[in-house]
């Protein structure tokens, strides 16, 4: 056991009780197979699986695109406001069970509007569940609209237009889906417009794409955070820059394992990132598809990389300092972590 823990059970208990924020979570990726079946039945949608076990067996991916194909298929069961409410409420309950006190979650409106589901329906269901989570659990939240990068910039512009009536409920915009071949530069203009509207900016970069995509996210999109960022480690100057700018990376260990970004969890670069002075955080990405929510992600790397109590506290602190909360709220959460540790 590393410094400060006498057993694996004690380390697990420490992680469970640690106050945390989750900054990288695709709400559609929290759709558990049980709910998928329930919604398929409720909405009379055919799904190509006979059982929950069959669904889980299909979750074997060799890269990001493998996963995305099944992720877009899965979200096809979501149709009504109640569906988006149920999806989001289920995630909030799981996050609360992991002592996640603040969430900043992505949604993919183009994955729904392209199927004829109104933007208003999506946002109404998600925000009603987030409001209830605040009342029920005291959990705070921010919503981030992601543009699908395999689609055109014009499609992203039209999606931003659709979001305009709801900007009081949307904190930022992000960029997700198939990375390689769809660099940040493809979306420079729409992100500039979003920034002008006062929205925060994040982008997936360096998950499968090269360090050049991380540079583009910084220089062209002017991001406030990098989602994933793993491949930044291939570029020493970039690592120095990210550390110097205190840029938060939203790292997703079990996602990296399931999508073969790392060969083995013992090869995960999280500890290297921390040692290089990078502001890394631990997140679940698409927990239903990748096999674990936030605490499972902390546990996997704590175990494989022998993370110390100090490392775990740093990760939890980074999750709040890298959030889009105000200074007073950040200070309140950091004080709670210090009191706990
Ligand atoms: N990467 C890119 N797009 C995504 C992901 C991811 O990990 N999850 C959902 N959409
Ligand atoms: Zn992601």
Image (tube, helix red, strand yellow):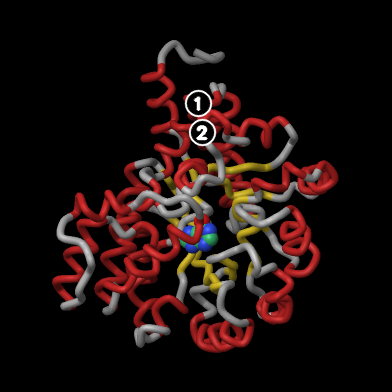
Q: Residue at x 63, y 82 (%)?
A: 153
Q: Where is residue 302 in the image (x, y as percent from the top left)?
A: 50, 27
114 and 125: which is toward the camera? 114
Q: Position of residue 296 (x, y in %)?
A: 40, 37
Residue 273 seen in the figure: yes
Q: Give the foreground label among 2 and 1.
A: 2
Q: Do the residues labelled 2 and 1 touch (CB within 8 Å)?
A: yes
At x 72%, y 63%, the residue is: 217
Left or right relative to 85: residue 105: right
- Residue at the location (66% across, 53% down)? 206
Tell me the tag on residue 304.
1
Q: Which of marks 2 and 1 is nearer the N terminus?
A: 2
The residue lying toward the viewer, choosing from 228 and 94, is 228
Residue 164 falls in which quadrant of the image?
bottom right
Would you identify the image quadrant in which residue 160 lies? bottom right
Q: How crowded is mark 2: few (under 14 residues within 10 Å), some or many (20 or more)?
A: few
Residue 33, percent from left and from top? 24, 57
Q: Quadrant of residue 55?
A: bottom left
Q: Which mark is residue 264?
A: 2
**Residue 105 visible in rendering:** no
Residue in view at x 19 percent, y 70 percent: 40
Q: Taking 274 as reference, is 182 above or below it?
A: below
Some atom of ligand 1 lies within 8 Å of the CB belonging to the residue at label 1: no
Mark 2 element type: loop
């Amino acid at each position: 056991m590393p410094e400060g823990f006498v057993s694996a059970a004690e380390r697990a208990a420490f992680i469970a009780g640690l106050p945390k924020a989750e900054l990288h979570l695709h709400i559609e990726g929290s759709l558990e197979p049980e709910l998928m079946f329930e919604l398929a039945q409720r909405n009379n949608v055919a799904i190509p699986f006979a059982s929950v076990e069959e669904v889980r067996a299909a979750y074997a991916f060799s890269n990001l695109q493998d996963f995305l194909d099944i992720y877009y298929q899965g979200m096809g069961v979501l149709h009504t406001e109640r569906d988006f409410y149920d999806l989001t409420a289920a995630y909030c309950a799981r996050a609360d069970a992991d002592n996640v006190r603040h969430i900043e979650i992505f949604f993919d409106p183009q994955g729904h509007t392209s199927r004829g589901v109104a933007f208003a329906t999506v946002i109404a269901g998600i925000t009603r569940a987030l409001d209830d989570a605040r009342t029920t659990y005291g959990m705070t939240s921010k919503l981030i609209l992601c543009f699908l990068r395999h689609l055109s910039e014009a499609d992203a512009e039209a999606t931003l237009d659709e979001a305009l009536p709801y900007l009081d409920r949307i904190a930022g915009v992000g960029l997700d889906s198939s990375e390689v071949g769809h660099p940040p530069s493809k979306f420079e203009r729409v992100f500039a417009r979003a920034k002008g509207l006062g929205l925060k900016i994040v982008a997936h970069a360096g998950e499968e794409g090269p360090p050049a995509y991380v540079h583009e996210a910084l220089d062209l999109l002017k991001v406030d955070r990098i989602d994933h960022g793993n491949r930044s480690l291939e570029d020493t100057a970039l690592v120095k820059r990210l550390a110097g700018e205190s840029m938060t990376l939203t790292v997703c260990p079990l996602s990296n394992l399931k999508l073969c970004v790392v060969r083995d969890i013992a090869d995960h670069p999280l500890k290297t990132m921390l040692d290089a002075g990078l502001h890394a955080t631990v997140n679940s990405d698409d927990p239903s598809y990748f096999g674990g929510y936030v605490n499972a992600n902390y546990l996997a790397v704590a175990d494989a990389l022998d993370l110390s109590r100090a490392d775990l506290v740093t990760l939890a602190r980074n999750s709040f300092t890298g959030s889009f909360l105000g200074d007073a709220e950040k200070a309140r959460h950091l004080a709670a972590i210090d009191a706990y540790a």
